[in-house]
Every structure is written in structure tokens, then in C-alpha cells.
Amino acid sequence: MASDVKSETAYKALLKTSKNKKHHQLNKFLKETEIISIDSRRNKNLSLKFFIIKTIIGQQVSIGAAASIWKKTEKLLNDKKRISLGGLTDCGLSKPKASYINEVLSNQNLDCYTKKDLKKMNQVGISDLFLKIKGIGPWTLGIIQMFYLGQEDIYLTGDLGIKKAGLNFFKSDNYEAKDYSPYRTYLCMYLWKSLND
């Protein structure tokens, strides 16, 4: 219920800002679409490492391909046998992605943090922790913050879909959406939805 209230608050704020900033196309789209919740995109059953691995798999591949590769990879990870690069590539992963996943699995530092710990960290601390890990760049970090930690004000400037929607709605592919703070995660979700609609 609390997430419904948050989603509605965010939706109303985005509507108001899009009207005030004369982002007419976005305002029209928001009026015609249903309210989106961050929780609808979160899988609360995944551990941090599994979430990161699933996110790495989703980088630069279609949703269908990512889902298929993740299903095979998750089965392999759940078998609790020793994970090899060969086993990971057999799931459909490229060699670089397989090595990134291996690095995440062997990173003992990640085991020291609970979700609660991560939520207390500032941007510098969280960037220091994750961006040192091969395979995790700003996009992956943003996805972790949005859909693992549930942070509401993350904007993925480097995401191709966000850039494309930005051109449609803001006439710019490098708009940082500061006007839409503190609800930029929600804005991203609506921008992605606009491409699917």
C-alpha cells in the first residue's frame, strides 16, 4: 500500500513538472498511461550477487535473450557446484560477461553488505564499492540503485532507451532531468514504457 502512495505521489509530481516545463508530449503521455510502481520491477527474492549477475546478463541484449540466458545461468548457480567460465559460456554468455560474473561470484567484499547497509551509503560510497568490479559501469550501478535498493531519484543518462525517449520528449538525448528530481527513477520507467507503447 505504501508503494502505491509513493507511486501516485511521484506520478502527480511528474505530471506537474512536465506541465510547468512545457514538456507537452510527455505530459500527454503521462495522462494517457497507467501509474507505474518501482516495486513492480523489483525481484525481492534475489540476493545482491544474483541481482548483479542478472543485470550484467541484461546489458545490451534483447529482453527475450536475457531472460533465456538468465534462466540457464540461475539454474547453474543454484546447483552450488564449482562455477567455471566454460559452464557460464554454455549458458549463452560471452566470454567477457562470463568473466565478469565469475568476478562478482568471487567478490567477498559484496558479502559484507546487507541491503540495509547499502541504503545508508552515500553516492560516493556506493560508487566506490560497485564501480571497482569489472562488468559494473554507471548503467549497471544505476539499475542496482533503482531496482535492488529502490532508490527513487536515479536517472540513466547512458541508457539507449532513455536517450531515445529523451529525444522524443525533451528534444535532447543528453537531458539530465534535474527538473524531475526527486522522482527520476519513475521518470525513467515512464520513458521506457513510452518506447514499448
Image (cartoon, rainbow, N blue to C red):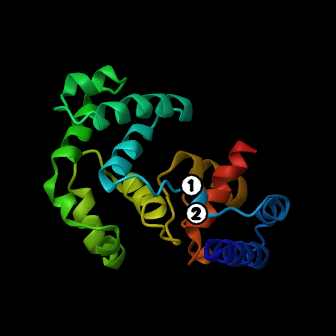
Q: Which residue extends farthest front?
A: 79
- Please name the amino acid that badge 2 sits on: Ile
83 displayed left or right of 30: left
- Of residues 77 and 62, the one drawn nearer to the viewer in this rendering: 77
- Of residues 28 and 21, the one drawn nearer to the viewer in this rendering: 28
Residue found at x 16% / y 60%: 109
Residue picked out by circle 2: 38
Q: Position of residue 111 (x, y in %)?
A: 20, 59
| Vertical arrangement, residue 107 with respect to residue 1, above or below | above
Element under disc 1: helix
- Please name the amino acid that badge 1 sits on: Arg
Residue found at x 54% / y 66%: 176
- Of residues 160 and 42, the one drawn nearer to the viewer in this rendering: 42
47 displayed left or right of 63: left
176 displayed left or right of 127: right
Quarter holding the N terminus is bottom right
Number of numbered markers? 2
Residue found at x 26% / y 59%: 130
Residue picked out by circle 1: 41
Which quadrant holds residue 196? Answer: top right
Mark 2 nearby-residue class (10 Å; few <14, some 14–19, many ≥20)? some
Residue found at x 72% / y 74%: 8
| Vertical arrangement, residue 55 with respect to residue 84, above or below | below
Q: Position of residue 14 (x, y in %)?
A: 70, 73
